[in-house]
Image (tube, rainbow, N blue to C red):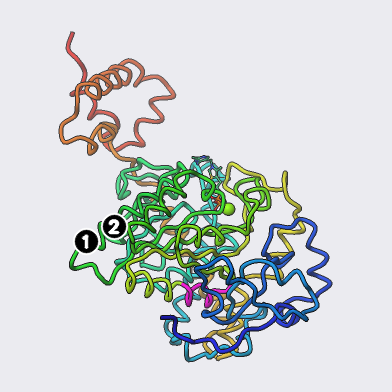
């Protein structure tokens, strides 16, 4: 049963007039990405009851007399805050169950994420780390969903969800050990930067091939429901609208539905898959429209509204546990940053659109205004915290940068209990190369960066 926590639905035109000026909306509609403020194709509603649907018919919610008839089309987008951070009329604040402490924790993490993003992005530009992907613009989708979870809910992420780990208390030194690939990295430097994994944080290691986490998440949820002591936990699987085009997305969602697995699929529809706009990614109504096809209850949420994401996630978790069934949440958001440090998005999108997004629909500004309206936060506190974060991050970055990498021989360990013959051969070959070239200029500079400086490999030299 859905708790009737939000009392009334609103027409889109009314919400928009509170959030953005109509002229701005028309101006920025040239590069439509669908459902987004520039060119919304869904009406907004402030009631969970109207927003959750499990039938493709349950999507006409707007006032037929509304000025913009386009609002009649498409699946509604659930929203609690308007563009200026005020609660929409009809939203019952007490139903949010949001304490000042929790609200502040959400804000603190929404500020920590971009603080780390900026410094790590620049560290890559300076050649200090090899790769980086930011969450700019998607702070509400990531932190809002994390805030509705228990620390033991199992997370299968794509790669833009470092905020979930931060929300669970993953420390800055762990972040830095991972991105610099130090010998203290939990993954022993075997992953690209930002491909985190942490058993203690119930965060399964990220893999680069898109969508592989989706069937894995369905399988993990199946395992979870068979465990007697994990009845209160769910699996959460994040992916982008681009990854949703992979065959694995179909396999995973269908498996979850038919086997009744308690997994919440959280799609971050951020308008782009590298350079492919979401308008070219699918011909239907986003990813949410697929939910009912699989028999999965679904909701589309304003992904830049942290309270809407949190409320939807709480509902999804309750549903997943109560019915032992999957749930699909599509968060409509916008990727403000470039895809990764290997990308320059000015090649395929208008810089002005990005600036408009930052200004017009900024998840941090919206939630900040909500907090300030209640006297729970001040601009000054935000500024002090930003400065503190910068100091803490730079300090940990500096420590990690000077730590050794794992020993070279360790790359042959941990996959097999005993190193199999083909890896023994490769290890001996590497030992031979280090022996042969170790004293050349290039290698002499590189080897000291590793724990044991390559000397651990000497034992694997084959005697002739
Ligand atoms: C199977 C596979 N195909 C292609 C890629 C290259 N690739 C990496 S990220 C990406 C775009 C993914 O977009 P989306 O799922 O929307 O996530 P976003 O980057 O927008 O967060 C692509 C095509 C890959 N990693 N794996
Ligand atoms: Mg995307």
407 up-or-down from 316: above or below: above
**Could you give the CA–CA distance between mark 2 and mark 1, rounded to whole angstroms?**
7 Å
Q: Give the residue at x 29% y 34%.
A: 411
Q: Is residue 423 magenta?
A: no
93 up-or-down from 286: above or below: below
Q: Is residue 402 left or right of residue 386?
A: left
Quadrant of image for the C terminus: top left
Q: Which residues are magenta?
A: 305-312
- Residue labelled with disc 2: 222
Q: Give the residue at x 50% y 65%.
A: 329
**Which mark identifies residue 226?**
1
Q: Give the residue at x 18% y 24%.
A: 459
**Which mark identifies residue 315?**
none
Could you say where residue 370 lies in the image, as x and y percent from the top left? 58, 84
- Which quadrant does ligand 1 occupy? top right
Front-most of residues 413 and 308: 308
Could you say where residue 422 lies in the image, as x and y percent from the top left? 24, 21
Quadrant of image for the N terminus: bottom left
Front-most of residues 393 and 35: 35
Could you say where residue 417 lies in the image, as x and y percent from the top left? 16, 36
* In contact (CB < 8 Å): disc 2 and disc 1: yes
431 up-or-down from 413: above or below: above
The local secondary structure at tag 2 comes to helix
The local secondary structure at tag 1 comes to loop
Q: State the predominant SS element of the stretch in magenta.
A: helix
Q: Is residue 307 magenta?
A: yes
Front-most of residues 194 and 38: 38
Q: Is mark 1 within 8 Å of ligand 1?
A: no
Mark 2: few/some/many CA within 10 Å (<14, 14-19, 20+): many
């Amino acid at each position: 049963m859905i708790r009737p926590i939000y009392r009334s639905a609103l027409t889109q035109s009314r919400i928009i007039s509170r959030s953005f000026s109509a002229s701005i909306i028309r101006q920025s509609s040239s590069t439509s990405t669908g459902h987004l403020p520039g060119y919304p194709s869904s009406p907004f509603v402030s009631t969970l009851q109207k927003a959750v649907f499990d039938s493709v018919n349950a999507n006409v919610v707007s006032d037929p007399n509304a000025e913009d008839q386009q609002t009649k089309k498409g699946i509604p987008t659930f929203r609690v805050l308007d563009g200026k951070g005020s609660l929409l009329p009809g939203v019952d604040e007490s139903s949010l169950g949001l304490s000042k402490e929790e609200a502040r924790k959400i804000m603190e993490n929404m500020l920590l994420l971009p603080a780390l993003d900026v410094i790590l992005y620049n560290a890559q530009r300076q050649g200090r780390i090899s790769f980086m992907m930011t969450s700019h613009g998607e702070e509400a989708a990531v932190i809002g969903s994390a805030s509705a979870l228990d620390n033991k809910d199992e997370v299968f992420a794509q790669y833009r969800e470092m905020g979930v780990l931060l929300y669970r208390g993953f420390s800055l030194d762990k972040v830095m050990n991972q991105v610099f690939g130090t010998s203290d990295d939990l993954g022993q430097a075997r992953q690209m930067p930002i491909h985190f994994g942490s058993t203690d944080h119930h965060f399964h290691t990220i893999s680069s091939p898109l969508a592989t986490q989706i069937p894995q998440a369905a399988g993990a949820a199946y395992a979870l429901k068979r465990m007697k002591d994990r009845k209160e936990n769910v699996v959460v699987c994040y992916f982008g609208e681009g990854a949703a085009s992979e065959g694995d997305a179909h396999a995973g969602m269908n498996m979850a539905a038919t086997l009744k697995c308690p997994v919440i699929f959280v799609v971050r529809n951020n308008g782009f898959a590298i350079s492919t706009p979401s308008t070219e990614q699918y011909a239907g109504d986003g990813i949410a429209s697929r939910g009912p096809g699989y028999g999965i209850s679904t909701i589309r949420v304003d992904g830049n509204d942290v309270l809407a994401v949190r409320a939807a996630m709480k509902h999804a978790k309750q549903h997943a546990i109560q019915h032992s069934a999957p749930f699909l949440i599509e968060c409509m958001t916008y990727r403000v940053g470039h895809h990764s440090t290997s990308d320059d998005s000015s090649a395929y999108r208008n810089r002005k659109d990005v600036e408009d997004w930052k200004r017009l629909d900024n998840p941090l500004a919206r939630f900040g205004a909500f907090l300030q309206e209640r006297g729970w936060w001040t601009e000054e506190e935000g500024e002090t915290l930003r400065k503190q974060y910068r100091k803490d991050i730079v300090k940990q970055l500096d420590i990690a940068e000077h730590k050794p990498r794992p020993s070279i021989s360790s790359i042959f360990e941990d996959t097999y209990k005993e190193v199999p013959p083909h890896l023994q051969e490769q290890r001996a070959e590497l030992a031979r190369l280090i022996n042969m070239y170790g004293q050349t200029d290039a290698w002499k500079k590189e080897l000291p960066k590793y724990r044991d400086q390559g000397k651990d490999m000497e034992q694997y030299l084959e005697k002739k």
